[in-house]
Image (cartoon, coloured by chain):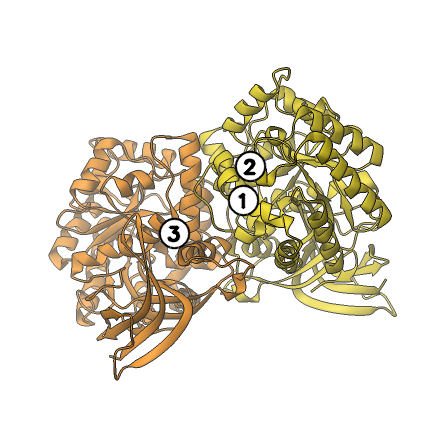
Chain colours: A orange, B yellow
Amino acid sequence: MNTFTLKGTFLDTPAPDTLRVREGYLLCENGLCAGFSETAPAGVEVLDYTGKIITPGLVDLHLHAPQYSYCGTAMDLELLDWLQQYTYPEEAHYADPAYARLGYSYFVRDLKNSATTRACIFATLHTDATLELMHQLRGAGLSAFVGKLGMDRNSPDSYREPSAAAGLAETRRWLDTCRAENTLHAGPVRPMITPRFTPSTSDEYMRGLGELAREYNVPAQSHLSENPGEIAWVAELCPGTKFYGESYSRYGLFGGGVPTVMAHCIYSPDDEAALMKQNRVMIAHCPTSNENVIAGIAPAAHYLRGGWRVGLGSDVAGGQTLDLFTVMATAVQVSKLRWRYIDQSEKPLTMVEALYMATVGGGDFWADFGEKVGLFEDGYAFDALVLDDDPLKNMRAFSAAERLERYAYLGKGKLTAKFAAGEKLL
Amino acid sequence: MNTFTLKGTFLDTPAPDTLRVREGYLLCENGLCAGFSETAPAGVEVLDYTGKIITPGLVDLHLHAPQYSYCGTAMDLELLDWLQQYTYPEEAHYADPAYARLGYSYFVRDLKNSATTRACIFATLHTDATLELMHQLRGAGLSAFVGKLGMDRNSPDSYREPSAAAGLAETRRWLDTCRAENTLHAGPVRPMITPRFTPSTSDEYMRGLGELAREYNVPAQSHLSENPGEIAWVAELCPGTKFYGESYSRYGLFGGGVPTVMAHCIYSPDDEAALMKQNRVMIAHCPTSNENVIAGIAPAAHYLRGGWRVGLGSDVAGGQTLDLFTVMATAVQVSKLRWRYIDQSEKPLTMVEALYMATVGGGDFWADFGEKVGLFEDGYAFDALVLDDDPLKNMRAFSAAERLERYAYLGKGKLTAKFAAGEKLL
């Protein structure tokens, strides 16, 4: 691994309400941040980005790689109809290895070119296509947890596993392959148990996935309380449960011993939210998707300020873009509408809080695996973005905080350089 | 004026729910569309954009040129505090001709580089700076109505006219200068009577502005029913009125004889909305601004489908961007949240409806002055955008409608060429 220093204006968020701005040099050693100084360390190569602002790499806690092919289209339906009409037919194509290879090559190319350095990603139910995606991500130098989906009910025959037993056998084959490739617990790209969501995963399948998560010691992810119709359906499907999250928690797939990311959590009742906090479930807040699929506005400010763990997700292709800066701006914007129409007891999010969620907030998921992510502090992964806001120049001089705000809101800046775990990707 | 044809894939909206897609050649003569054909007209220069999608130029019905200097910042306050803390101090600088010249040069440069071909623009209360803006816009080849603001109350001394009489005298001086420059009723850049909004314009001043609008035969613009606090304040300031709009209509500044644009109209009660329809007031729907300044979500779908005249506004710098494609996408997104949380009787807007509002919807304001704007039909102004979506390429082939959708949602395409009234600006 390289040893070098970056020079520029560094912005990070040691706390949700604190933007730290420092001019100087950040040393990288062995892929980690190894000291910040105001003068250049002697004898080390300097990558000079004087005048540019530099943020930690952004963490996308929730997105669907196979949906990238129709990103920015199919924006006219609510979740459940959207899945049946657009999503399942597209994801079914990934049974074909050539299709998967091509589709994922576009996704990985554009993710590499984006502001994202780490992600938690849904693949499809196909084991081999999921492995293909993992290989491509590793080849691109990105860090990710990736899930082969578990789906044995309520989707078309062409895109459903024939039984829980068959699905569990495939999941085991996938995890065994990861073990053979030494990616089960090591390396930047690792597997993550992924029941798609309760309506698509039977009790037997969910129980088996919980057992596999513990047997193989891998984390989990799924969807939670995204849409009123979905929530009512889960209540029908799981008559013994008090809330949606219990359909996961009763099988050990809701934090606690198994680190878990749950996407959305828009309509979580108090007892569900309490269990999320107790079990340290990581919330993936996906504001662009929650608009597009007509879901709603999650109480992200409440979660963030109330001690829940929360990061951001692009949720491509419910979300229209991989660009987490756009997602940050949208998180602030919709939190204002939530204040206006739903809950005036919680002030809207700030851009600093949005940056926190997109960096150390979501990055904290990696802490469950011994990695520090999301700050420019010693021992943290050297994930960094050099942002060129020259195209946004105006007559006025802007502070570093304002430059970040403009970069996120205006969408016309350029990502000049990108480092992930000390490797220069762009 | 040039005679030439454009070749490409043309998209326009003859009705709000109709996207027309045509491959072929559009002839420009004397700045107007002069015939569409599937084969090249003989003997005319062809600008060949085969493979590119081409839309009408976009119409920005509401924005504030002097606020462009802080675009994308100052996103933490509601309207009335935002005006006092950020807006008035910045606009006050435009008393200085050098400051105005420089500030407007950035604005005009970026407006020219944007998708906007026509606009209704608020300047400041300064006559000379307003004339400067008009000159720069004309020099850039853009079409616009521009307003010197009328403000004689409720702002700091440094940014308020000393009396209604003084303000009216300045307004008259401004209109007389326009007459002398032959821009009062001719040319692409013309004046528009502009009381900032009722809280900033006394009854006496408002009455005088109504008289000047009729005397000089010029249109009008202002703000309406944007924020609950503002509306309550107007009710206090104007005890005789039944609704906010009456504070304009009682002085003849609410459509009817004086063509009028009113921005926002988020909380318009039924009687106000009925008068807007009756008087053919043009509504400027500004969804990005309405999020950022924590205003709310206007019932744009209801207006559009119910027979009101409605276009889109960027409302820079309440809105964070000049890019009306972003405003189109946001209009669709927030209409979904409105459906979810406020009114399930009105389906969300579609991207086709958003394009309609951004082109012929807002363009219809020019019909009040004998110009046809917003369609690729004979006699319409030759305003056209050539959109390069090559950077958005994916494995899948997209229809023209999907390409438009992706261009608007993804924000990473490029404006390859731009024509305004037959003149090539980019």
Q: Residue furthest top?
A: B240
What subunit carries mark 1? B
Do circles 2 and 3 both sit on a common chain? no
| Residue pointed to by mark 1 | B89
Name the residue nearer the viewer: B416 or B150. Answer: B150
Residue A123 pos. (x, y %): 33, 58
First in sequence: mark 2 vs mark 1: 1
Using the rendered image of the protein, determine whether residue B328 is visible from the camera's viewpoint. no
| Residue pointed to by mark 2 | B156
Using the rendered image of the protein, determine whether residue B91 is visible from the camera's viewpoint. yes
Whether pointer 2 and pointer 1 mark residues with C-beta atoms closer than 8 Å, the reply is yes
Q: Nearer the viewer, mark 2 or mark 3?
A: 2
Q: Quadrant of residue A91?
A: bottom left
Real-space CA distance between mark 2 and mark 3, rounded to the nearest whole angstrom = 46 Å
- In terms of secondary structure, where does tag 1 sit? helix
- At x 30%, y 47%, the residue is A17
- In terms of secondary structure, where does tag 2 sit? loop
Q: Which mark is residue A315?
A: 3
Residue B224 pos. (x, y %): 61, 31
Q: Nearer the viewer, mark 3 or mark 1?
A: 1
Real-space CA distance between mark 3 and mark 1, rounded to the nearest whole angstrom = 40 Å
Q: Residue furthest bottom?
A: A43
Dot 2 crowding, Cα within 10 Å, few <14, some 14–19, many 20+: few
